[in-house]
Amino acid sequence: MSVNLDSYKTFYYVAKYRNITHAAKALFQTQPTVSRCIAGLEAELGCRLFVRSKKGVMLTPEAELLYQHISAACQEIFLAEEQLSKHKSFQEGLIRIGASEMTIHHCLLPFLGAFRQKYPGIRIQISSYNTPTAFDALKKGEIDFAVIISPYPQISGYRVTRISTFRDIVIVGKDFSHLCSEKMDFQKLTSYPLICLQSGTGTRQYLEELFEHFGQELRPEIELPTTDLIVPVVQQNLGIGIVPENFARKALQEKSVFQVHLRQDFPPRQISVVSHQLHPISLAGQQFLQLLMQQMTMDDKKSTPQVELSK
């Protein structure tokens, strides 16, 4: 038997209202169209479903049996359509994001409030990952996308979209402010107590490789678990900090820390969104990324005109 699902939908409304006219109005159809559909369904199933009365129609015992199952199926279909409609209009949804501590602070936190205010029904889950574990979570489908910082491995099967560029800078407190009078090279930099992230982070590995490139070994005096701790420690004059510029911007404006310029600037680093090609991103996730990229592009144009958005 291969009954058209529309026929069962018509049957559902006739059985629900016990009235062909009311069913026709609910279906936005004419009464003769509904009657023909029911007659066709009865012929297809080989049994009578309705008995006409002055008040409408009565269900036969066979129709009562059929309605129990069709009613449950229709309710599930209607619920699915309602939920899908809410997802399409961003009234509901779930976004699963993998991000490092740095990208949470640099990209997500300034943006999340505005997004949540615009789409309060969308749930957001943020998991803290370093770059290797983020790629693994993407492969397993545990997150929709990850926001990571270069350098990162070039692995096939992933989509990578750059959304922002930043530079690391060297900052000092007032007791070391005399170092700002001239440009410093990496060799001289290592002669002072350095403050940076602890081992095991992508940023720490990046800095170690960079110092090695200039023939120096990175041996920090103070190692911290999160980037946002670097500026407060530098403000206490405990050493020279290496930190992304935006983490120090407010302190630089307040003159509680000062920037030391280098002969060889830190190369720019990229913040990118990575997703797995085999795991499509939800409509809510796509909307989140579109607005995030727009916001990051506008912010970068204000601070770093050379940034371009790769698609």
Image (cartoon, helix red, strand yellow):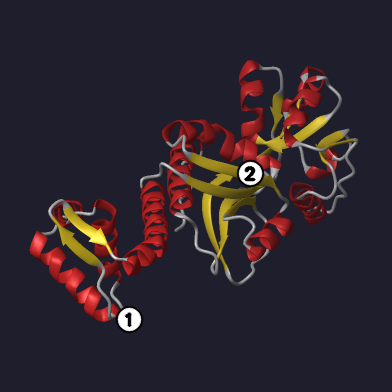
Vertical comparison of 298 with 146: above or below: above
> Looking at the image, can residue 197 be seen?
yes
Q: Residues within 10 Å of mark 1 (few under 14, many from 20)?
A: few
Kindly indicate the quadrant of the structure image that contains residue 219: top right
Query: Compared with residue 81, is residue 90 higher up or lower down, i.e. above or below?
Result: above
Q: Which residue is mark 1?
A: 2
**Residue at point 29%, 60% (across, down):** 12
Say which label, 2 or 1, has the lower sequence index.
1
Q: Quadrant of residue 47?
A: bottom left
Q: Quadrant of residue 46?
A: bottom left
Q: Can you give x and y, in whole percent of width and height, for residue 72 in the image? A: 42, 58
Q: What residue type is disc 1 on?
A: Ser
Say which amino acid is labelled 2: Ile
| Vertical comparison of 140 with 287: above or below | below
- The CA distance from mark 2 to mark 1 is 46 Å
Residue visible at 64% across and 67% down? 154
Is disc 2 surrounded by few (<14), some (14 to 19) or many (20+) residues within 10 Å? some
Query: Percent x, y for residue 202?
Result: 75, 51
Question: Which residue is label 2 attached to?
Answer: 126
Camera-nearest residue between 282 and 295: 282
